[in-house]
Amino acid sequence: MRAGSHLERVMEKGLFAVTGQLIPPKGNDAGGVKKKAELLRGYVDAVNVTDNQRAMVRMSSMAASSLLIGMGLEPVMQMVTRDRNRIALQSDILGSTALGVKNLLLLTGDHPCLGNQVDSKNVHDLDSVQLIDCARRMREEGKILGGEGFAGEVGILIGAVVNPFGDPFEFRVVRLAKKIDAGADFVQTQPVFDMNRFKEWMGMVRDRGLHERVHIMAGVVPLKSAAMAEFLRSGVPGITVPDNVIGRMAKASEPAEEGIRICVEQIEELKEMEGIHGVHIMTVDWEEKAGQIAEMAGLLPRPVLW
């Protein structure tokens, strides 16, 4: 056991893991965070808390994660390299683990041009692979970059993000291998809408035996409308939404319910796929649907492990 987190126990026992998503508010309303978190209780094993998602200024992921811990829920605290140099990143790893965070998801983050601070500057002192390696060294060696030791222990499960839909396609599996080599214990993928391409990517993952070295959680997003599907396809880099999915959403008399049905179908298919160890349900401010999706997909009850 590296972290002793519930999510780690679920994965280590070979159970199909489920994580949800909580996007902190554009403000300091702790009550709003708690209300969203209650909608996820019992339906997921841990809750990803995003870090200024899409480069929008929001309550910090560390603060929101601390609120979840106070409620008895387990966060997966996301940290992006976009906004912090190595001093701040390592400081936040120490600070978050002092608050009780046991799962970190380390990623690059969206470019500021997508958000509400378009004049801000990227930092990227470390890239995501370097940050994963840094976190692993802090956990396993008790040292910060440069070799200086610190008081205490950093017991964390280290997560990373992978995108099977970016180009060049063959490089995507190489990128996954780099993150595993750096120390990733689990990875979450970009939302899967193009199942054929995802299956092809997973074939390459299995050919290299990578699915036996890391826990792979496939990302899924319930669509609310055809317009949302079109936006994801054209406005969000790295997401592929095939024509048949757009078509189903456009023809549906109840688009939101059709979006949930598509999401459930995706989860059912992913559950049967060799090498997939769980799903990450990204509800995108639609937390009240997480329970319905989990129930329809046969993901309940979630295991209670001690």
Image (cartoon, rainbow, N blue to C red):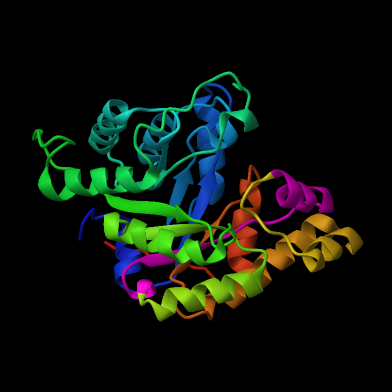
Q: Position of residue 110 (x, y in %)?
A: 55, 38
For the N terminus, the image quarter is bottom left
Q: Position of residue 299 (x, y in %)?
A: 53, 69
Q: Position of residue 3 (x, y in %)?
A: 23, 53
Q: Residue at x 42, y 28 (%)?
A: 123
Q: Is residue 49 left or right of residue 253?
A: left
- 125 vs 234: above or below: above
For the C terminus, the image quarter is bottom left
Q: Is residue 6 left or right of residue 115?
A: left
Numbered marks: total:
0
Q: Is residue 224 magenta?
A: yes
Q: Residue at x 61, y 52 (%)?
A: 238
Where is residue 144, by image quadrant?
top left
Q: Nearer the viewer, residue 139 or 98?
A: 139
Q: Nearer the viewer, residue 91 or 237?
A: 237
Q: Is residue 75 left or right of residue 234?
A: left
- 68 vs 116: above or below: below
Which residues are the magenta region?
210-235
Where is residue 215, by image quadrant?
bottom left
Q: Residue at x 63, y 23 (%)?
A: 116
Q: Position of residue 148 (x, y in %)?
A: 9, 33
- 137 vs 124: above or below: below
Residue 198 showing in the rendered view:
yes
Residue 297 showing in the rendered view:
no
Q: Is residue 141 magenta?
A: no
Q: Residue at x 25, y 44 (%)?
A: 135
Q: Is residue 14 left or right of residue 83?
A: left
- 126 vs 277: above or below: above
